[in-house]
Amino acid sequence: MPDAAKLIAGILIGLLGLIVSFQVMPLFPESTAFGNFAYYNAFIGLLTGWVVMGKRAGRGITAAINNGFGGALMLVLWGLFIHSCYQMFDRAMDNWYNGAFVALAAIFEFMAEYALMLINPLVIFTLIAGGIISGLATEFAWRTWR
């Protein structure tokens, strides 16, 4: 059921995904072609905020902060997973892998490789601050527009 908390959570975590995407782009090698990378992450954030954070609103301020942390963490995990799957699929179409299990293992290798690129103080601070703000705003939306 759509409500204001889900909408606010989706918009704010989507915006967080967009901001963090633009912060992460300079950390990758210069030859990386990003395409619509930031917009895909914004869409992942929109879905994450709507599904994960929106339904957990209305449990108090401490739970709202934890909800924001959880939403930011799920944004990162789903983003890593989806982009790693895309990278694996792209390489699988070029016959890089000998079997299905090697290709599936490559997903987790790409996730680890990309996660190491995210270890940057600015990115981590943005995720934490954005998560707290998103969680508190979601709680406020739940209390105001039930």
Image: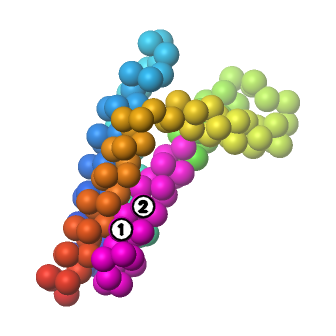
Badge 1, how many Cα within 10 Å: few under 14, some, many 20+?
many
**Residue 65: numbered disc:** 1
Observer able to see residue 50: no
Q: Residue at x 68, y 40 (%)?
A: 107
Q: Position of residue 66 (x, y in %)?
A: 42, 69
Residue with the most extreme bottom position: 146
Residue at image position (42%, 55%) is 72
- Report the residue marked by disc 2: 69
Amino acid type, residue under disc 2 in the picture: Phe
In reply to whether residue 79 is colored magenta, the answer given is yes
For the point 51% across and 35% down, the residue is: 119
Stretch in magenta: 54-80
* Vertical placement of residue 15 versus 9, above or below: above
Q: Quadrant of residue 112?
A: top right
- Magenta segment main secondary structure: helix
* Side of 70 where 143 appears, left or right: left
